[in-house]
Image (tube, rainbow, N blue to C red):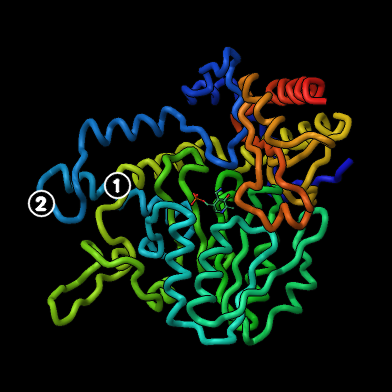
């Protein structure tokens, strides 16, 4: 049995989940003749009608290109898009709206920063990456190392899926130029001690990028208080649409980085002799952005704030504790990722069974889970496993759904063994 620690600001607030579920049209559908039980929230969350309505309203009433039109629709779309940027700024407590760069999501955000550091690194500089990263927070940095001759070093983790902080502190040195780590691991659910990571990195003069893709659905980070240099989010994991997200960067850092892509919108003046670039945030927003997506990202934050992040975290923790207890009783089931601080993600395997086979049978019962390496192959190598089954819970899931999952796993077990 594991010991769980509630964050100090988690108050035991109950959610009216029956009412909340009515906001999500997709939860009414059936899959393979069974009511859908959606437990793949870490991959993408579902979208409430409040956000769908905003998308429909955009295309029905004011679809137009932004920032460059004098006509009413263009101005309306521009206003709504920039209002969304302010909403995002406020939510994450960034100091200035232009520190929020709209991107297509976390992958785009990380590549933007990795590209920018090409001109800022020298051969032999060191970058530190945590052992539990998603591929999108590994590969762009490896590519950066190839371009610059910088060296990538790994902060190891223990069997519980927690970073070994003593090793992190000894890896840090004046050679360290960048540290990158997820706030929450997608494969294990671990909440990393990012306050300590950021503070220690800053003491040796290193910048820090935190991948917030998995955290933003459960935690409302205060970026100014964290004093983080870069933070990334994908809207589709927080009840928003796919193909949009943000890069937060401190103004000083964003001014230091060169533009990532060239094109319309990101320029001040263009001539064949010389081009100058626009100010922040436009310098990093070349081309026509995902206008509707940006506006809907703002609406998704409104929706989640209306429910309240304390209430969400408290309820999801209850689901995590219940699911862990129930799943642990299944013979041969092993959970990977038992960190003291974790979100509502359970990665597991059953002795003698392949995760893919379990996932396939669960799907036949209308239960959506994810199987495989979860874009985190180094974690699977660490545990010497090909992959896991991952059930990830959101504030619209219920204990009853967890019971159905447990019965489904037992059924899969009896069919496969
Ligand atoms: N980092 C983490 C921790 C993730 O979970 C994901 C998505 N699975 C990503 C990065 C990449 O996000 P996106 O595909 O939205 O760019």
Direction from residue 297 to residue 30 in the image, left or right: right
Q: Secondary structure at mark 1?
A: helix
- In the picture, the disc for residue 291 is 1
Q: Position of residue 68 (x, y in %)?
A: 15, 55
Judging depth in this view, the residue of 13 and 111 nearest the camera is 111
Which residue carries the number 2 mark?
70
Q: Going by the image, does 194 lie left or right of 211?
A: right
Nearer to us: label 2 or label 1: 1
Which of pointers 2 and 1 lies earlier in the amino acid sequence? Answer: 2
Compared across the picture, whether 403 is left or right of 395 comes to: right
Could you tell me how far apart the alpha carbons at marks 2 and 1 are, in whole angstroms? Answer: 17 Å
Residue 36 locus on image (x, y percent): 58, 21
Q: Nearer the viewer, residue 84 or 394?
A: 394
**Which residue is painted at 14% across and 82% down in the image?**
273
Q: Secondary structure at mark 2?
A: loop
**Residue at the outermost left position:** 71
Residue depicted at 59% across the width and 65% down the height: 226
Q: Which mark is residue 330?
A: none
Please count the marks in the image.
2
What x and y, as percent, mark residue 13? Answer: 67, 34
Residue 9 vertical position relative to residue 263 in the rendered view, above or below: above
Query: Residue 11: x, y in percent?
Result: 69, 41
């Amino acid at each position: 049995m594991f010991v769980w620690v509630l964050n100090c600001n988690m108050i035991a607030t109950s959610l009216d989940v029956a009412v909340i579920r009515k906001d999500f049209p997709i939860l009414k559908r059936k899959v393979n003749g069974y009511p859908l039980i959606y437990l793949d929230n870490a991959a993408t969350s579902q979208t409430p009608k409040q956000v769908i309505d905003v998308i429909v309203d955009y295309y029905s009433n004011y679809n137009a290109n932004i920032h460059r039109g004098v006509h009413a629709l263009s101005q309306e779309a521009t206003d709504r898009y920039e209002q969304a940027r302010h909403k995002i700024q406020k939510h994450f407590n960034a100091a200035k709206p232009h520190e929020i760069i709209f991107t297509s999501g976390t992958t785009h955000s990380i590549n933007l920063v990795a590209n920018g550091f090409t001109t800022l690194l020298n051969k032999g500089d060191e970058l530190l990456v945590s052992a539990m990263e998603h591929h999108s927070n590994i590969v762009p940095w490896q590519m950066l190392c190839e371009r610059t001759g910088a060296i990538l070093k790994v902060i190891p983790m223990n069997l519980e899926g927690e970073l070994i902080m003593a090793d992190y502190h000894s890896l840090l040195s004046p050679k360290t130029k960048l540290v990158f780590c997820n706030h929450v691991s997608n494969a294990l659910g671990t909440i990393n001690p990012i306050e300590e990571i950021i503070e220690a990195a800053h003491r040796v003069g290193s910048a820090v990028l935190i991948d917030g893709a998995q955290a933003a659905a459960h935690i409302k980070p205060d970026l100014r208080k964290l004093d983080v240099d870069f933070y990334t989010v994908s809207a589709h994991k927080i009840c928003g649409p796919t193909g949009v997200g943000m890069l937060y960067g401190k103004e000083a850092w964003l001014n230091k980085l060169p533009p990532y892509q060239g094109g319309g919108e990101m320029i001040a003046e263009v001539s064949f002799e010389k081009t100058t670039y626009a100010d922040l945030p436009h310098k990093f927003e070349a081309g026509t952005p995902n206008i509707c997506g940006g506006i809907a990202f703002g609406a998704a934050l409104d929706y989640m704030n209306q429910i309240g992040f304390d209430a969400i975290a408290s309820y999801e923790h209850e689901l995590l504790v219940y699911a862990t207890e129930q799943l642990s009783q299944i013979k041969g089931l092993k959970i990977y990722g038992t960190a003291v601080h974790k979100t509502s993600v359970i990665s597991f395997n059953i002795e003698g069974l392949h995760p893919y086979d379990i996932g396939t049978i669960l799907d036949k019962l209308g239960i959506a889970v994810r199987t495989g390496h979860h874009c985190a192959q180094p974690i699977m190598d660490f545990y010497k496993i090909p992959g896991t089954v991952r059930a990830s819970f959101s504030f619209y899931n219920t204990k009853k759904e967890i019971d159905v999952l447990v019965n489904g796993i037992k059924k899969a077990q009896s069919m496969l063994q």
